[in-house]
Image (cartoon, helix red, strand yellow):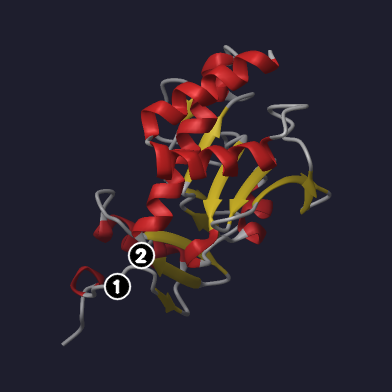
Amino acid sequence: MLLSLTQIEIPPGQKVLLRDISWEKFNEILTDLGEQRGTRLAYARQTLEIMSPLSEHELDKCYITNFIESLLEELEIEFCPMGSTTFKNELMQQGLEPDHCFYIENEAAVRGKPRLDLAIDPPPDLALEIDITSRSHPEIYAVLGVPELWQFDGEILEIKVLESGQYVSVEFSPNFPDLPLKTVIPEYLNRAKTQGRNRTMKAFRAWVQTQI
């Protein structure tokens, strides 16, 4: 008797690799698993990775997402948060679900669209990956053409930009030039965990105002 993927339980922090998965099968699996799930998927070279994040992973993702949204709001920059939307490109045979992502420069191009197709729509301008469960796939982001990738390993925030098909670490985000976010965001993240979210977010927004 064949097992359905919905019958397989993946413990937090663990992953399952399925090999020799065709593009058609990948799309069938996406449909079978549905959107209301806690796992994340990545697909490349006919290998599908299904990962279940740790609670620490999710906490860091939520806080850093809050910081990014606060930055954009305080700077009065329109944006579209797309969460862990599945991004895929059939021509490139690649797909993945970021921890979180944002349309910023290309926000107007996707505004109001219920579904995105990277064959015709632009990729997100900024993607966030929490590497605590070691699931970042920069090579897939590069193929999909995501111009900026943030990776956080629980201590260090790396900001990378896409140059000639590869990611290069930079000191400042192109979306937030001249702001020392590589040091400031981990600092405020630690404060949120010790002093509380609301108090920290208020302090972070006040800091952003001093930089404007």
Residue at 45% across, 21% down: 202
Disc ID at residue 158: none
In this rendering, position of residue 151 left or right of residue 200: right
Whether residue 109 is situated above or below residue 88 in the rendered picture: above
Residue 165: image location, x then y, percent: 78, 52
Q: Position of residue 97 (x, y in %)?
A: 46, 52
Circles 1 and 2, Cβ within 8 Å, touching? The answer is yes
- Side of 184 where 162 appears, left or right: right
Question: What residue lies at 46% left-to-right and 49% top-to-bottom?
Answer: 99
Question: Given the image, on which type of amino acid does mark 1 rest?
Answer: Pro
Mark 1 is surrounded, within 10 Å at the Cα level, by few (under 14), some (14 to 19) or many (20 or more) other residues, namely: few
User: Among all residues in the image, which is located at the extreme front?
Assistant: 195
Residue under label 2, please give it.
52
Foreground of the two, 27 or 154: 154
* Label 2: which secondary element: loop
Instruction: Establish if 207 lies above or below 31.
Output: above
Specify whether residue 123 is in view.
no
**What residue is disc 1 on?**
11
* Residue 201, placed above or below residue 185: above
Residue visible at 39% across and 69% down in the picture: 13
